[in-house]
Image (tube, helix red, strand yellow):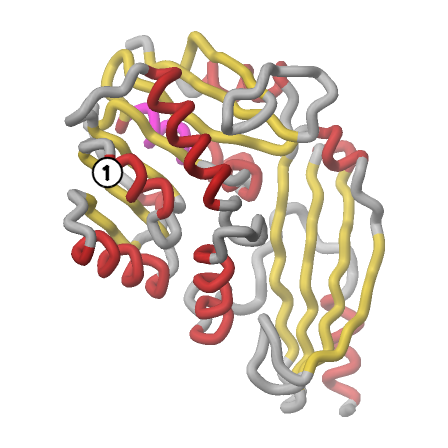
Amino acid sequence: MNKGLIETLIQRMRKPQLFAKSTAPFWDDPHISQHMLQAHLDPDSDLASRKHETIDKAVNWIIQELALQEGDHILDLGCGPGLYCARFAEKNMMVTGIDYSKRSVQYAKEYAISHKLNIEYIYKDYLTIDYKDAFDLVTLIYYDFGVLADQDRDVLLKKIHSSVKPGGHFVFDVCTPKYHDSVKEERTWVYEENGFWRPTPYVLLTEKIKYPQHDVLLTQYFVLDSSSNFDIYRIWDHAYNKHSISQVLTNAGFHAMRFYDDIMGSEYSENSKTMAIIAKKVT
């Protein structure tokens, strides 16, 4: 291993600033995105999407809780391969899905065509959406809200507020500080001949770092392959409690918030590691 690489390793392994970006693409990496899609489509896995049985329950609960009707317009942000979109469309709703993975969006489009589902899929960064009073419901599911830095979060909330019709809803879920309390700061090393991160041999360091004064948890993956390529993939999670998320939503113009333990509508409790929120656009 050359001296320059060692110096790079040392520099990059220092505790990063809040919401520092990854050093390489994640969602559209040809190898990683293939494994991500496989994980999404595994009906018994919670790794990329939730188990499909859970998704069924979540969609049915959302429809019932919000009294959604055939023909209602739904926008699913971070839709992946369209697991939620397809279920809403099967209920004869007008669905738009947006995701930043070309592979997932392509799969979702092909699935919608083959199953004759009325869904529009768009490959783009959902921070750039620009709709006005277009949707009865906007969803952002599986803790995507927590990956956003405060500035990006506030930008997105304004765009979502603009996208929702008056009287419409925004449904999403987050982790709570109770989840962060259950996670230990640690580093683990593994060697893989081939795997999720590379098709060739690599060493993987997985690290958990807490920023308790900000209610933020970082999971970062250091990947060093056999060609001495070194990349860092960072997954951030900003946790919220009932009070902190209420303030953020109120500042964005949402009101009449309802809280649950999870996206299936379980009764809210202060000790839950997760929280689902229904926020209403009043005006």
Quadrant the N terminus occupies? bottom right
**In the displayed structure image, the side of residue 241 where residue 100 appears, left or right:** left
Residue at 61% x, 76% y: name it. 195
* Residue 184 placement (x, y as % from top left): 84, 46
Residue at 50% x, 41% y: name it. 144
45 in relation to 144, above or below: below
Could you tell me what secondary structure mostly forms the magenta stretch? helix
Residue at 48% x, 52% y: name it. 43
281 is within the stretch colored magenta: no
108 in relation to 34, above or below: above
Q: Residues within 10 Å of mark 1 (few under 14, many from 20)?
A: many
**In the displayed structure image, the side of residue 81 where residue 230 appears, left or right:** right
159 is within the stretch colored magenta: yes
* Residue 138 placement (x, y as % from top left): 33, 30
Quadrant the C terminus occupies? top left
* Residue 3 placement (x, y as % from top left): 79, 88
The image quadrant of residue 230 is bottom right
5 in relation to 145, above or below: below
Name the kind of residue labelled 1 in the image. Answer: Ala
Q: Which residues are magenta?
A: 155-162
* Residue 2 placement (x, y as % from top left): 76, 91
**Total marks placed:** 1
Q: In the rendered image, which residue does mark 1 sit on?
A: 89
Q: Secondary structure at mark 1?
A: helix
